[in-house]
Each structure stands twice: as C-alpha cells, then as structure tokens.
Amino acid sequence: MQLTGALKRILSHLTFWVLLAIIAAVILGYFFPATAIKAEWMGTGFIQLIKLFIGPIIFLTIVLGITGMGNLKKVGKIGLKAVIYFEIVTTIALVIGIVFANIVQPGKIDKTGLPIQDASAYESSNADFSWIHFLRENFTLQVLIAAIVCGILLSMSKHQQRLTPLLTKITNIVFKALKYVMYLAPAGAFGGMAYTVGKFGIKTLIPLGKLMLTMYGTMAVFVFIVLGLILRYYKLSIFKFLRTIQEELLIVLGTSSSETALPSLMVKLEKMGCSKPVVGLVVPTGYSFNLDGTSIYLSMAVIFLAQLYNVHLSGIEMVSIVGILMITSKGAAGVTGSGFIILASTLTALHKIPLEGLAFLLAVDKFMSEARAITNIIGNGVATLVISKSENEFTAPATVIAEQITQKPYSHL
C-alpha cells in the first residue's frame, strides 16, 4: 500500500527518527535497564564519529572564511566583538541562575534521603585546574587557533589563488561524508539515552526533582526571554531559529553532548545567511567560552548546596560567586569533569559550603547535562546570528555547502 503524502514527509525527516529513537530508549531503559546499558556503545560510537569531523570542519571553514574575507582587521573586529558578547551574556546567565535559585530555593529539602555518589575525585583535584591544562586538552580551541594562524598566513601568501580551490573541494568532500554519517543520528541518540535511563534510573530524579525542575525552567526562561529578546532586537525570531535546528537539538538531547551537533549547526547557520568567517570564528570559540547553560548550572548549583546545608550567603558573597564563575566558567569545556572541578574551586574559595555536597549533584548530573548542552548550542547559534547581523555579514541563505545536509536525509523512503 502506498504511503500517504503527509506520512511520507514525516518519515523523510531526521527529526522524526531521532525523536522515535529517544522515546524507544526511555522505554527500554525503564523496563529493561540491564539491556539498555549495553547500548552505550551506540551513543559513544556516534559521538566519536562526529568528533572526527569537528577538527577538519572548523579548520577548513575558518581558513576559507578568513581568505575569503580578505580584510584581516575585519576578522579581528569580529573576534573581539564575539568575546565581549560572550562575557556579557554568560554573566547574565550566571546572575539568572543565582536569582532563580534564591526565588525557588531548590535546596530547601531534607538531604537525608538523597542519592549520593562518590565525589572524592573532584574534591581532591580542584587545585589541579589551570588554563594551560584547559588549552592542552581542549581540541576545539587548539584547532581554532591553528586555523586562524593558517588563514592569516594563506591570505598573505602568493599561493592563495592556487590553494583556495583545493581547500574548497576538500570542504565539499568532508561535508558530503558528514551528510551520510548523520544517517546514524537516531542510533546514536538511542544508545545515549538508553544508557542514561538504564544506568541512573528515572526514579533517582524524584528526591532532587525540585532542583531538576528549577534548572530546566530557568534555562527555558533564559532561552525564550533573554536570547529571544536579543534576537528580536536584530529582527530575528527565536522560535524560527529553534525550528531550524530542531534536529540538532534532539541529537544533543539523546547524546547529552553539544559537540555532536557542532558540524551540522555550522552548516545550518550558513544556510540561514551567516557568513562563513563569522560562523567559523564564533561557533568554535563559543563552544569553549560561551557556555550559557553551563553558567546557569554552575551558579545555581552553588546556591543549591548553600541552601542544602543551611548556609547563609550575604549579598557580597553572591557577587563574589558571580565574579569567580565569570572567569572559571570559561574553562568548563573540553576537560572531562571540569564542571565539578570548577564547582569545587568555587566552594573552596567561599570557605562556607562543604565540598561533599558535590556527591548529591553527581547523582542527577547526567540528567541535567542535556539541559546544559541544549542551552549551550542555542546560545552559540544566537551569538553567531547576532555577530553576523551586527557586522553586516548576514546575507541571503547560502546554498553551496549548506544544501549538502538537508532536512530530509530519508527522502528515499
């Protein structure tokens, strides 16, 4: 029997299959946790596969973007504007996290029945975090720096005209390969979500449900109100943007990693009309320094633990928390466990909140990582749109590379 036109359109969208995979993963994880845990390799395998594309895509996009722009002063201006934007918006995120935590007070609960995990590794290693260590382990930032240097050198080289077409051909090949890898997105989302639910169990959310709801609610307010108003100022819609990247958001939800959507996010932003240099500079830099979701989580977690232990924080101490996290939160990417290391460092600096409180956060951290990752990717997309519009680098939708990843990868069904 022939499929109806409407049903065929639904089945041809990646969004449908990823959503279906997530639902199936939750059901499997809840009823058959032992089996669900074994599906972890599908999630981690997909993440590792996508990570293979991150380096080449960032490098090629930035190099071609810088050489295509020609004006190196313009490149520097875009980079500086992006850094200033990151600092302002992430500071707003930190403040919002503190404000909502004080209003809702998710830590005003009995901690005797809360699930606990071992946090000793983070308690003992909080002094080991450093910016040198962060740069050494942050592959995205390393590629970004190398690409900027190569882009500048190539734009000044006499071989630019000969090498640029070659790099363009390589870029087309990389994006075409990525198009086929994205066929595996439902499997990756299924494996990641099945493992999370099977390993940690939905019932572990109940004791810390107030914290979970506060965290998700605060991030929703930040996305729809703060980022929404920013986009509205530039005559763009947050809802249209979210619809455009709905597939990326579902993939992030399933895998708990915003890196899985980085390559395709860059493609979508170019398709929306952002110039290649802006996309190449802002998105990779934002993945290291524009972590809106992580900023909300970090500030809210500190207040949560203070409430949990009935520790009163003065106004000056609240400001101190924002000041500390304004600097340290920028290093919360690329280093495994760095979020908890930063929290431990902040608690140590305050000398009032017990470090063992991290054990309570560890119990539900996996379920909150989805909200952090989704908010981070939305924040970086908005930042790219804002910088593009403000620099007059926002034009008619690109079609050359962007069309290589369509919204209908299963259109042959």
Image (cartoon, rainbow, N blue to C red):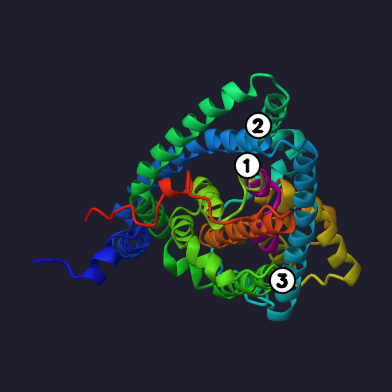
Q: Which residue is mark 1?
A: 334
What separation in Å lies between label 1 and label 2 (alpha carbons)? 18 Å
Instruction: Give me the residue at 72% from left, 80% from top.
Output: 103
**In the rendered structure, are the residues bearing label 3 and label 2 in contact, judged by CB atoms less than 8 Å apart?**
no
Instruction: For residue 309, say whether it is visible.
Output: no
Of circles 3 and 1, the one toward us is 3
The magenta stretch is 280-296
Res 233 label: 3
Position of residue 237 measured from the top left corner of the image (x, y, whole percent): 60, 71
Q: Is residue 283 a member of the stretch shown in magenta? A: yes
Q: Amino acid at mark 2?
A: Ala
Pick out the residue farthest to the right: 316
Question: Label 1 crowding class (10 Å Cα cut-off): few <14, some 14-19, many 20+?
Answer: some
Q: Is residue 68 above or below residue 81?
A: above
What separation in Å lies between label 3 and label 2 (alpha carbons)? 32 Å
Res 217 label: none
For marks 3 and 2, the one nearer the N-term is 2
Pick out the residue farthest to the bottom: 103
Question: Label 3 crowding class (10 Å Cα cut-off): few <14, some 14-19, many 20+?
Answer: few
Q: Nearer the viewer, residue 306 or 148?
A: 148
Of circles 3 and 2, the one toward us is 3
Instruction: For residue 307, say whether it is visible.
Output: yes
**Total label count?**
3
Position of residue 322 measured from the top left corner of the image (x, y, whole percent): 82, 61
Secondary structure mostly seen in the magenta stretch: helix
Position of residue 382 measured from the top left corner of the image (x, y, whole percent): 64, 60
Q: Amino acid at mark 1?
A: Gly
Quadrant hosting residue 149: top right
Q: Quadrant of the image for the N terminus?
A: bottom left
Quadrant hosting residue 69: top right
